Amino acid sequence: MSATITRADVEKFLFREARLADEHRYEEWLSLWTSDAIYWVPCDAESADPLRQVSLIYDDRARLGDRVERLKSGTVLAQDPKPRMRRVISNVEIAELSATEVTVESNFVLVEARGIHQHIWCGQSIHTLRQQDGELKIARKKVLLVNSDREMPALQFLV
Amino acid sequence: MSGAAAASAVEIGQLIRPDRVHGRVYRDPALFRLEMEQIFHKVWVYLAHDSEVPNNGDYVRRQIGLQPVIVIRGSDGVVRVFFNRCRHRANLVCNHERGNAATLRCPYHGWTYSNHGDLVAPTFDEAYEPTLRSEDFGLTPVPRVQSYRGLIFASASATGISLEEHLGAAREFLDLILDRSPEGRIELSAGVQKMRYLANWKMLPENSVEGGYHGHFIHKFAFGLFDSRSGRDRLAHEEEWVRYLTGGHMLEDFRDVQYRPKQPPSGARKAYLETLSKTYGEERAQSLSFGHAPILFVFPNFLFVQTHIRRMQPVSVNETYVYYQPMLLAGVPPEINQDILRIHESSFGPAGFLSPDDIEIMERNQIGVEAQGNEWLFIGRGIHREERLADGGTIGHDMDENHLRGLWQHYARLMSRA
């Protein structure tokens, strides 16, 4: 596979990932990740070192698999009934591009309708996407929530 | 005692019985206000740990009940606690959550205080009467501040029992938690996860120290995952004890639980366990190792659970903030503290596999207590078999509710005292 990664490829990928997450399509969402992936949601945008600082999420591929298994189990109370969600992805900017990898920054606004509440979540995602067997996969995703250091409700969906 | 307080005291007596509590204690805003006065503004409240303000000038903002305070280490190295309120017109002198400051300057009219709390610069002071002395306008200290092994507590009441008396039987278990560091020193330097839930503050200690009862239901899947991932099997679930420690403090004691390791410990863990044995002896080292750590509630707002110190902040009768701060250990290989962070994240905070289910259950509970057909919540499990200790504490079996019965009797006493 030698075709260069284009902006259109990247946007298509981000929109698809968002749709799978919004629609609780857990297995398909999980299949987007590489086997050595890191999924990181810091709990303070200033904390740069997950080995010394606590995060909201700092998953390797095995932990991410557990996260998805739990969501699939139907036992997560904050997912009973399942929240309805839609997110808008915008401000897509390519930060780094090589023959096989791209680092892309984007913003999202996500509305989660759960029970009597409607939560609005917003932040910046930084994806590192890698070309693997002709497809893009997520090697690393960091999500900086605008309210990461504020008192927040349960975050029990795929962000 | 004022007339209003006296009337409330009578009512409290009617709301709490040995084996049940009335739903009103969770939903009545008048009782919430009385709790602030009778409990949070009188008793010792946990505020912070020394390691959060390591350097001179370091400060963190906290609350005692609903009152804003600032915990600050002065340039003389002494930690003081002040009400966060300018002596001029009561603005917040400190608006940042944490930081370092030689002086605190009120943004409203510029009055400036040293990090010892002294007023160093009123502004445009030529028009104040010459008899006024700036010594009389320092930041107001919280009446009593005491520490236990680096844990800083304060009381907004000038009188009352000492911190040592307040901690009472809980001290033994605080030691058991803090001694997990071979240097006996912990660090709350890893940051904090913050959650809010729409339910009463008292549901958090009741839910956090649960003797495993609700675990069989709301955490079943997560516990199964953890068991399959951890390097050990728990042999039985019957050797844990639930204790009421007097003073409102509650404990889950896991020291007797037997584990069978599935695989040999990592190099770092082996080194850690050896250091613990050398420092404290074989038997205590066993009690200190992971899996045997207690769950401890120190009344009214401090919890230790497995990996972290959990601080609770009431907001209103049906809203509460929770702060989860992983407890790092001094004097251990870095891998041990990294493990603590990763294990913590798997379970706790907004995206963990346990906390969100607890939060959801408390929010549903708050809706449930609005129903008025039969208003009593039942906490009678194990009442026939609880062992009563000489000091007033009790010991019950795994899943018994003796500790909750103790908590509520303590609550009733505080709420109805003069």
Image (cartoon, helix red, strand yellow):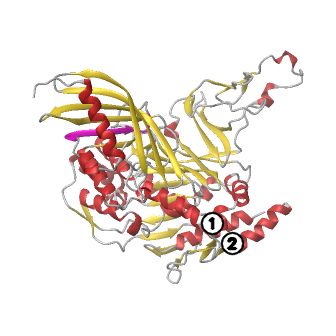
Badge 1 crowding class, 10 Å Cα cut-off, few under 14, some 14 to 19, many 20 or more, is some
The residue beneath circle 1 is B370
At label 1, the amino acid type is Glu
Q: Residue at x 52, y 30 (%)?
A: B55
Magenta run includes residue A41? yes
Q: Residue at x 39, y 58 (%)?
A: A76
Q: Residue B278, how many percent across, how many down?
A: 31, 52
Q: Residue B177, how many percent across, how many down?
A: 43, 54
Q: Is residue B291 left or right of residue B200?
A: left
Q: Which residues are magenta?
A: A33-44
Q: Is residue A131 left or right of residue B52?
A: left
Q: Is residue A151 left or right of residue B255?
A: right
Magenta run includes residue B345? no
> Label 2 lies in what chain?
B
Q: Is residue B341 visible?
A: no
The disc, 1 or 2, on the residue closer to the chain's N-terminal end is 2
**Which quadrant, please, contains the N terminus of chain B?**
bottom right
Which quadrant holds residue B376?
Answer: bottom right
Prevalent SS, magenta region = strand
* Helix, strand or loop status at disc 2: helix
Badge 2 crowding class, 10 Å Cα cut-off, few under 14, some 14 to 19, many 20 or more, is some
Cα distance in 3D space between marks 1 and 2? 15 Å
At label 2, the amino acid type is Leu
In the image, residue B234 above or below residue B136? below
> Label 1 lies in what chain?
B
Label placed on residue B15: 2
Q: Residue furthest left?
A: A1
Q: A8 or B41: which is nearer to us?
A: A8
Q: Residue B285, how many percent across, how many down?
A: 34, 57
In the image, residue A141 above or below residue B294? above
